[in-house]
Amino acid sequence: MGAGLNLTALRKDGTEVAVDIGLGPIETGEQPLVACAVLEVTEHRAVEARLRQATKMQAIGQLAAGIALEIREKIFDAFFTTKPVRRGTGISLLCS
């Protein structure tokens, strides 16, 4: 239920926690029933967010490994050029 949604629930003390909800039909032969499971996933979501960040940083590291050392050393300068003087601009602008 709520696949892809960020669901929350309130504890008795009023704190809000992230939850996943699972529903499933129960066949009784008389009337339809539904079983419901509510799982707190606050820590699970935090771990997933850290994993996504680590994956991004790994990709940046792999990309940086393919850049020439003299460029890598200047990459965080506000302005730097990748070409010799009077050989075109090759200018990069750091935007933050």
Image (tube, rainbow, N blue to C red):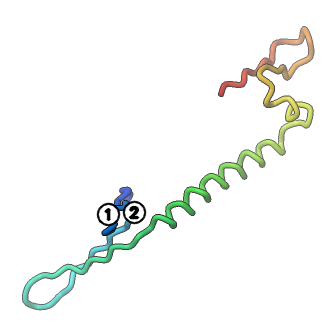
Please, is residue 62 above or below residue 13 in the view? above
Q: Is residue 71 above or below residue 52?
A: above
Residue ID at (77%, 47%): 61
Q: Residue at x 35, y 59 (%)?
A: 7
Count of labels in the image: 2
Q: Residue at x 27, y 74 (%)?
A: 23
Amino acid type for the residue under numbered disc 2: Val
Determine the secondary structure under disc 2.
strand
C-alpha gap between disc 1 and disc 2: 6 Å
Vertical order, 22 against 4 (above or below): below
Which three-letter amino acid code belongs to the residue tagged 1? Leu
- Is 25 placed left or right of 89 in the picture? left
Question: On the image, numbered disc 1 is attached to which residue?
Answer: 10
Question: Could you tell me if the residues under marks 1 and 2 are in contact, i.e. CB atoms within 8 Å?
Answer: yes
Q: Which mark is residue 17?
A: 2
Which x, y percent locates residue 4?
A: 38, 57
Which residue appears at 38% of the width and 56% of the height?
6
The residue closer to the viewer here, 10 or 4, is 10
